[in-house]
Image (cartoon, helix red, strand yellow):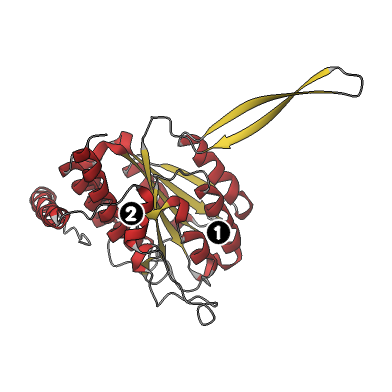
Amino acid sequence: MSKSKEQSILECVYVALELGFEQASQSTLPGLLRRISPDGGTSMRDSIAMGTSLMIKFRDVSIKLGVGNLWNFVHIILTDGADAGSKISSNDLKGLMLILSQILPKEFLKTIYIGVDIENDYSAKRELAELAAFGQSDIYNVNNNQIDEIFERIKVSLGVLTQTRGIYARDNQGNQVGLIQYQRQGVLMVEKQRYMVLFNIDMSGSMYSKWTKVCNAVERFMTQLGDEDLVCGIVFNNQCNILTGHRVQQQIQRPVERQQNINPPSQQNQAQNYIQYQQPSNQWTNNQKLAALFIGVILNLWNCGNNLGLIIFL
């Protein structure tokens, strides 16, 4: 890898850490999720908009630095009900998703909607179906007992390989016996391709009875990711909060918080663990400003053509 490319990757990683991503192998997300006591409403659209904005920002910076195609984006949205209380409308959210699709080709983005126990909730089913159809995304409607199973299916669809290894032994009669040991590995289908996994997880009151299973499924999913993969967790009820990275929100209710302080790893340590760290220049801040200007131009053109007032959380 050339020095200039390595520096570009480092700058992108630093931007990702600023946005709230963490190195997957050292992510605080599983532990932080277990400290949440679900409560409140469901501002799902606001949460998706927040996650989409993060991807737009990172994608723009990575393209300007010439390493945009090194990362595959995986966006997983899990909820058990229809939106209630979001400030952004469905049409505005779709406009934001359209902007993302213009700068992030479909082959680099996989969005998955998971509806838990919404079989009899027509509003929730319709809303998820409309969003999934608009973004050409995958959608799964599952019951509470299928949460872990659906995350396993997602791992397979992302290219997590199951490798087999043959082991031979001899029985009591001295005959050779062939045994097969299965070893699941988080291996990318494309060599040196990196994942950026973004979770949008519903922590409203109705998720209380499902929360332990969600935490277990997310933790097992993350064990399959590699050292060069990055993870960000956004949780939502009446509000949306980036849970990971330096943006751990104090207002999130955690029953254990009074007994133990949360000390997420510093951004610099995360970058050092990702790759031998060198302090990046301030170029990325200028890129973010250019990204905002670029997106603003697109929004104006979109408004002129469609008379839509889009909201972007920049």
Mark 2 element type? helix
What is the crowding at mark 1: few (fewer than 14 residues within 10 Å), some, or many (at least 20)?
many
Residue 291: % across, % down: 14, 52
Residue 36: % across, % down: 51, 70
What residue did someone put label 2 on? 271
Which residue: 43% across, 45% down? Answer: 227
Residue 12: % across, % down: 25, 49
The answer to whether 93 is drawn above or below residue 187 in the figure is below
> What's the distance in space between the residues labelled 2 and 1, CA to CA?
26 Å
Residue found farthest to the top:
175
Residue 230: % across, % down: 38, 50
What residue did someone put label 1 on? 215
What's the residue type where badge 1 is placed? Cys
Lateral position of residue 254 relative to residue 276, left or right: right
Quadrant where the N terminus sits is top left
On the question of residue 98 being in view, the answer is no
Mark 1 element type? helix
On the question of residue 7 being in view, the answer is yes
Residue found farthest to the right:
173
Which residue: 53% across, 70% down? Answer: 35
The answer to whether 239 is drawn above or below residue 283 in the figure is below
Which residue: 45% across, 59% down? Answer: 201
Q: Which of 274/247 is in front?
A: 274
Of marks 2 and 1, the one in the foreground = 2
Mark 2 and mark 1 lie on one chain; the one further toward the N terminus is 1
What's the residue type where badge 2 is placed? Ala
| Residue 178, quarter of the rendered image | top right
